[in-house]
Image: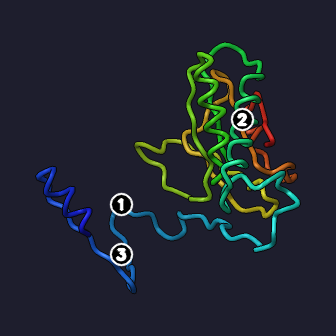
Amino acid sequence: NSLLRKIASESNLKAASSSLLKGRLAFYPSDNTPTDSAWPIFKSVGDFKLKDNFLTQNYGRLGLTSDTSKEASLKARKIALGLSLKSGPVRVVGTGEFLHEPLIIASTLEERGFDVLFQSTTRTPAALGPVLKTQKRFKDNYHESIDNFLYNPPDGQKENVIIVYETNTLPEDHNLPGLLGASEVIFL
């Protein structure tokens, strides 16, 4: 709270914070709220089994040493420097929380002169509206058949689409590369 008060006083803006240790949410329908039947149910919880056999290495979600982080960044940069892409914009898609190395690839491609857009998949279902206009729904790449989403996805026709995975294989029910017309699929 002291940092918030300091920022508020320095910027002449009103600011407030609150903390909730225990609470309750209640939702009430209104005229513009979809009914329960309009909201599909999504699988969002995995099987809680270790995924080590699907991962080439730990890329940071469990912590990294500086040497490991540097090696992973150099590997991603080397891959990006070796990609042969058609001219035009490039969209780099990271998968879930695996973002650092895909971002290194996007940054390196931008240094090479490409117009790059970076985004990530998510497990979070969200309502479409003015900002989130379209959505692709697909199964995760961790072999759990969890519903994943990509909002405002590329159409695959106007740009190079690169999907970067931390997993070393894809399950049969994972169809994101086909949905996006991916030009490159990278397994780090």
Q: Quadrant of residue 79?
A: top right
Residue 144 location in percent, x, y? 79, 64
Q: CA distance from mark 3 to mark 1?
A: 11 Å
* Local secondary structure at mark 1: loop
Give residue 93's quadrant in the image: top right
Mark 3 or mark 2: which is in front? 2
Instruction: Give left or right: position of 141 versus 61.
Output: right
**Which residue type does callout 2 highlight?**
Leu
- The quarter of the image holding the C terminus is top right
Q: Nearer the viewer, residue 156 or 64?
A: 64
| 131, 59: nearer the viewer | 59
Tell me which residue sits at (68%, 62%) in the image. Answer: 62
Q: Earlier in the sequence, mark 1 or mark 2?
A: 1
- Left or right? Give the position of 99 relative to 13: right
Q: Which residue is mark 1?
A: 32
Tag 3 residue: 28
Is 136 left or right of 29, judged from the image as shown? right
Task: State the image coordinates of residue 137 (x, y, percent, origin top left).
Answer: 66, 51
Residue closer to the observer: 14 or 47:
14
Amino acid identity at mark 3? Tyr
Q: How many marks?
A: 3
Q: Are marks 1 and 2 in contact (CB under 8 Å)?
A: no
Mark 3, Cα crowd under 10 Å, few <14 / some 14-19 / many 20+, is few
- Disc number at residue 74? 2
* Kind of residue at badge 1: Asn
Q: Residue 77: image x %, image y %?
A: 70, 31
Q: Are marks 3 and 2 in contact (CB under 8 Å)?
A: no
Q: Which sits in the foreground, 103 or 22?
A: 103
Task: Identify the secondary structure beneath mark 2.
Answer: helix
